[in-house]
Image: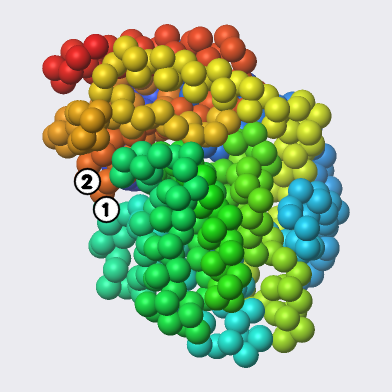
Amino acid sequence: MTDAAPLPPSRLFFQSRVRRPRMAKAEGVYVWDQQGRRYLDGSSGAMVSNIGHSDPRVLDAMRRQMEQGTFGYRLHFETEAAERLADMTCALAPEGFEKVFFVSGGSEAVEGAIKLARQWAWATEQRSRWKVISRTPSYHGSTLGALALSGYRPLTEPFEAMMRPMPKVPAPRAWLDGLPMDDPATGAHYAAMLEAKILEEGPETVLAFIQEPVGGASTGALVPPAGYMEAVREICTRHGVLLIHDEVMSGGGRTGRFWGGDNWNAAPDLIAVSKGYGAGYAPLGAVTAHDRIVQPVLASGGFPHGHTYAGNPLACAAGVAVLEVIEQDGLLANASRIGEVLKARLQALAQRFPFIGDVRGLGLLLAFEMVSDRETRAPLPKNLDAYERLVDLAYAEGLIVYSRRSRGTEGDHILVCPPMISTEAHVDEIIEKLTTALTRFAAEAGLPA
């Protein structure tokens, strides 16, 4: 814990023993603890709170739904909130996406997407197709099915005996591999690895390829190189492989488009979304797919999958209000504009701190990766625990950021992803606090600044 205030014992356990102050309230881009200290939520929690905290319009919508009913089981009743959110979601989705399946979170959304894909193969007499190719590094969720897709050994290794790991191809990390981002040959290079893997596995056995259009925590806001997305789409189509976009983090408007994939002309066959879709107001996620996937499944007897809280009216009412706020307040445009400002300021920090090797991302899904040498892109010594230490130093300054390692046990990156309501004044505050944290980290680690 970085705050000196004592805390009573806790019976909760999470990823670590680190304790943080008790939250008192959250509003806009800020969170306060019970001692009255204010923190700027520079990562939107875990890239969730896209429209900021405690928006009164969302709270009012939830209050109205609570007065009508908080639960209606989907097999017993339709609800206005779920129907309306489904309509709004399909209106935002690519052409031909006419159906939505609601879930409670990102891992559930990914599980639902791969099970829907498999059910489609079953219904269309393509039962030899079951392999879902994914990328490494990648992260698609914490349930066993989603972990089988994830290419991140610190999280997957303990559970490999309990699941069926799926084939992997390298993520298109052009910067790390020293390849030009804007050269279509670079995109073709990484896409060719996917086609080679499909051929190696046997196209008749490959069901789908899943990717994050813009990388999340595992790759630190990785943006694919020129030509990659279009080439992947063409390869999947040619081999009858379904393309799944994991939009759990990039969906909901964070990249400046509602879907991260909308930044390219390469529509997927299925989409999994959560996080910013409900913006933290209630557990909410969804799977949506093209009708050519859904209709054969429905015709074969329905989708044999579900969760108790799927389509929960309270969560869906929150989701409707979140989408309305995004539209009413022009938050897609703001994410794009403020994202450009923040990215430029982060790039300026890289000029001051030579151990910042790369600044990347789209909109307000941004990150920087730290290195010991910019030329070789060698990571910082892993014993520095830079990804954890810098988070703590920023927290001590009243700034919340998010971190992970993108090369397994090394390769530290920091995600800077404030809510889509952020202003240039908030960017100034983020950079001021982050500069102090970086300066202190450099001094501790003996790094140049």
414 in relation to 27, above or below? below
Give me the residue at 75% from left, 61% from top.
97
Q: Is residue 92 left or right of residue 406?
A: right
Question: Can the viewer see residue 55 in this picture?
Answer: yes
- Identify the residue position indicated by label 1 in the image: 154
**Which label belongs to residue 409?**
2
- Which quadrant holds the C terminus? top left
299 or 136: nearer the eye?
136
Say how the picture is coloured.
Answer: rainbow
Q: Is residue 320 left or right of residue 440?
A: right
Q: Position of residue 328 (x, y in %)?
A: 81, 29
126 or 311: nearer the eye?
126
Q: Crowding at label 1, few (<14), some or many (≥20) Cα neighbours within 10 Å?
A: few
Q: Secondary structure at mark 2?
A: loop
Q: Are marks 1 and 2 in contact (CB under 8 Å)?
A: yes
**Which label belongs to residue 434?**
none
Give me the residue at 40% from left, 39% from top.
180
- Which quadrant holds the N terminus? top left
Give me the residue at 32% from left, 73% from top.
162
Q: Position of residue 402 (x, y in %)?
A: 40, 32
Disc 1 versus disc 2: distance between alpha carbons? 7 Å
Q: Position of residue 107 (x, y in %)?
A: 50, 57
174 in relation to 165, above or below? above
Q: Crowding at label 2, few (<14), some or many (≥20) Cα neighbours within 10 Å?
A: some
Q: Quadrant of residue 26?
A: top right
Residue, far bottom: 125
45 in relation to 193, above or below? above
Question: Can the viewer see residue 396 in this picture?
Answer: no
433 or 392: nearer the eye?
433
The type of residue carrying mark 2 is: Thr
Q: Nearer the viewer, mark 1 or mark 2?
A: 2
Q: Quadrant of residue 136?
A: bottom left
